[in-house]
Image (spheres, rainbow, N blue to C red):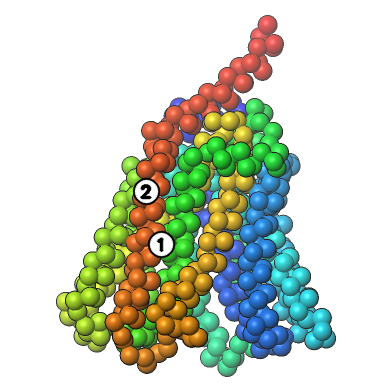
């Protein structure tokens, strides 16, 4: 790497279009995640598997998904080809995703009943390998895309907007168009949905590959030729010795658990259907909070570019704590049924303001964490000489999947605590005091706890803007010193 290829401030920056297009790699995998949200309808309604079997398979596959993460991370860290480290993994992952979806939905129901379950498990496992391959790159390749602290947060803007379009727009598309067109979750619906997903995800992956083309080169891999060789057994010492990594994992996982709990279907029923008395509000308010959520993300990212991502994460978490704490007190002193879009009084407007802030923060904080993973990876290179972005990214994926899988169990335990051992609270039930208190605890209290834990963890996370300047300066200097040593024999 020539000295001229590094900016005077020791940063290698990316163009805005490169950051925006690379974020589509995450969008491509999220498209498949969205499509697979409906796989249980195919497995039970078309293939003929039972609800219990499908639920068991999906739970088991979640565990398998976590197990594959460190293995895939190791593969990424060891990959080096003339096509780069990350681009081949992205393409292979996307091909596996498309192939597994095609086979799953077109073959499973054609098989004899005795073979369907085994085949479904096998093809789903292959899907997970493809998914993990491509998603791991989203986190790992942040290190080569840019190391400029004013640029890394920009990924969060693109990623947040793309995800809103996928998950909110996609749900509207399925519920309002596809179900109406096909009448139910049948093969016609699955074929149309999966075709659109495969084409769009393929295009997005191609654009992400183009975005990474100039950056996926060895001179951007840690210390390049100076990088220390890492074995699989070295991963535990790395995790044990990297305090910023540990703190970021704690922060990200608690935020993820809180976010997952909030989005559980029983929680939506308890809050909107029973406490507010209007379940239809859940969809309408979700649409209303989109614009505030995007604005909060823009403001947060702009602040992160000036003050650093650590400071942004802490201040955003405090804002979430304050808004949801006020909402708890708010609902303890008012009649919750007065919150209504047909009666836009002060009560409803205050609720919409505070709820939009809290939900916006719940969108911002996970998006900020992704580029922070690149900082943690660079710190490991600075500290030990090891370049292991694959391992860093898949540690977060593993924790993310394991923790989010606890959300249904946590909700079930909490509602069972107030007497709902056999079934979840149902629409039309009376709002008792225990149900009101538990709804507030699950909807607002758990997110508050997650944000507070994140704030505490960040007190022990020392990779602020000043420290990252030191890290990037040291890495650049080692590279430049290496070039000088290579040229010495020729000068002599």
Crowding near the residue tagged with mark 1, few <14, some 14–19, many ≥20 C-alpha atoms within 10 Å: many
- Which residue sits at x=59%, y=91%? 184
Residue designated by label 2: 456
Viewer-closest of 49 and 98: 49
Residue 201 horizontal/vertical position (percent): 61, 65
The crowding category of the residue bearing disc 2, from other C-alpha atoms within 10 Å (few below 14, some 14 to 19, many at least 20), is some
Q: Quadrant of the N terminus?
A: top right
**Residue 69 horizontal side relative to residue 364, left or right:** right
> Can residue 397 be seen here?
yes
Q: Quarter of the image holding residue 241?
A: top right
Which label number is shown at residue 363? Answer: 1
Relative to residue 363, is residue 262 depicted above or below? below
Query: Rounded to the nearest whole Å, what is the CA distance between mark 2 and mark 1?
Result: 20 Å
Residue at x 65%, y 76% (from the top left corner):
56
Spot occupied by residue 109 in the image (x, y as percentages of width and height)? 76, 85
Q: Which residue is the extreme one toward the top?
A: 492
Q: How many marks?
A: 2
Secondary structure under the numbered disc 2 in the rendered image? helix
Q: Which is more foreground, mark 2 or mark 1?
A: 2
Residue sitting at x 36%, y 50%? 455
Image quadrant holding the C terminus, namely top right
> In the rendered image, is residue 22 in sight?
no
Please report whichever mark, 2 or 1, sits nearer to the chain's N-terminal start: 1
> Residue drawn at (65%, 12%), measured in percent from left and top?
488
Disc number placed over residue 228 in the picture, else none: none
Residue 326: percent from the left, percent from the top? 23, 66
Q: Choose between 319 and 476: the one closer to the eye.
A: 319
In this orientation, which residue lies closer to the viewer: 376 or 269? 269
Q: What secondary structure is marked by label 1? A: helix
Where, by quadrant of the figure, is residue 329 drawn?
Answer: bottom left
Percent position of residue 139, x then y: 56, 50
């Amino acid at each position: 790497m020539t000295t001229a290829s590094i900016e005077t401030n020791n940063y290698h920056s990316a163009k805005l279009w490169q950051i925006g297009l690379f974020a589509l790699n995450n969008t491509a995998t999220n498209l498949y995640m969205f499509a697979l949200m409906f796989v249980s309808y195919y497995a039970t309604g078309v293939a003929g598997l039972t609800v219990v079997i499908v639920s068991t398979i999906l739970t088991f596959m979640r565990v398998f998904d976590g197990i594959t993460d460190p293995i895939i991370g190791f593969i990424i860290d060891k990959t080096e080809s003339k096509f780069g480290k990350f681009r081949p993994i992205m393409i292979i992952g996307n091909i596996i995703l498309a192939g597994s979806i095609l086979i799953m939905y077109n073959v499973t129901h054609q098989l004899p009943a005795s073979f369907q379950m085994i085949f479904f498990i096998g093809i789903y496992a292959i899907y997970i390998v493809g998914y993990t391959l491509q998603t791991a790159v989203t986190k790992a390749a942040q290190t080569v895309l840019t190391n400029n602290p004013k640029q890394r947060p920009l990924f969060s803007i693109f990623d947040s907007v793309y995800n809103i379009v996928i998950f909110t727009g996609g749900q509207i598309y399925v519920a309002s168009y596809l179900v109406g067109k096909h009448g139910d979750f049948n093969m016609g619906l699955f074929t149309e949905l999966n075709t659109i997903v495969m084409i769009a995800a393929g295009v997005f992956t191609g654009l992400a590959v183009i975005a990474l083309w100039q950056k996926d080169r060895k001179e951007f891999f840690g210390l390049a030729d100076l990088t220390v060789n890492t074995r699989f057994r070295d991963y535990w010492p790395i995790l044990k010795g990297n305090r910023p990594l540990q703190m970021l994992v704690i922060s990200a996982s608690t935020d993820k658990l809180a976010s997952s709990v909030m989005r559980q279907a029983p929680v939506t029923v308890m809050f909107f259907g029973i406490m507010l008395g209007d379940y239809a509000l859940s969809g309408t308010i979700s649409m209303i909070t989109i614009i505030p959520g995007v604005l909060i993300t823009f403001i947060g990212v702009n602040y992160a570019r000036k003050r650093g991502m650590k400071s942004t994460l802490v201040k955003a978490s405090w804002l979430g704590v304050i808004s949801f704490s006020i909402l708890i007190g708010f609902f303890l002193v008012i009649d919750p049924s007065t919150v209504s879009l047909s009666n836009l009084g002060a009560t409803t407007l205050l609720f919409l303001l505070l709820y939009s802030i809290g939900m916006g923060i719940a969108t911002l904080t996970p998006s900020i964490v992704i580029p922070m993973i690149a900082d943690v990876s660079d710190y490991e290179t600075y500290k030990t000489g090891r370049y292991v972005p694959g391992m860093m990214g898949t540690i977060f994926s593993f924790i993310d999947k394991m923790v989010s899988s606890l959300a249904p169990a946590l909700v079930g335990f909490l509602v069972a605590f107030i007497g709902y051992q056999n079934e979840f609270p149902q629409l039309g039930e009376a709002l008792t005091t225990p149900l009101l208190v538990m709804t507030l605890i699950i909807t607002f209290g758990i997110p508050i706890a997650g944000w507070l834990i994140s704030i505490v963890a960040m007190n022990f996370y020392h990779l602020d803007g000043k420290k990252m300047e030191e890290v990037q300066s040291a890495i650049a200097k080692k590279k430049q010193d290496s070039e000088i040593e290579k040229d010495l024999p020729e000068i002599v």
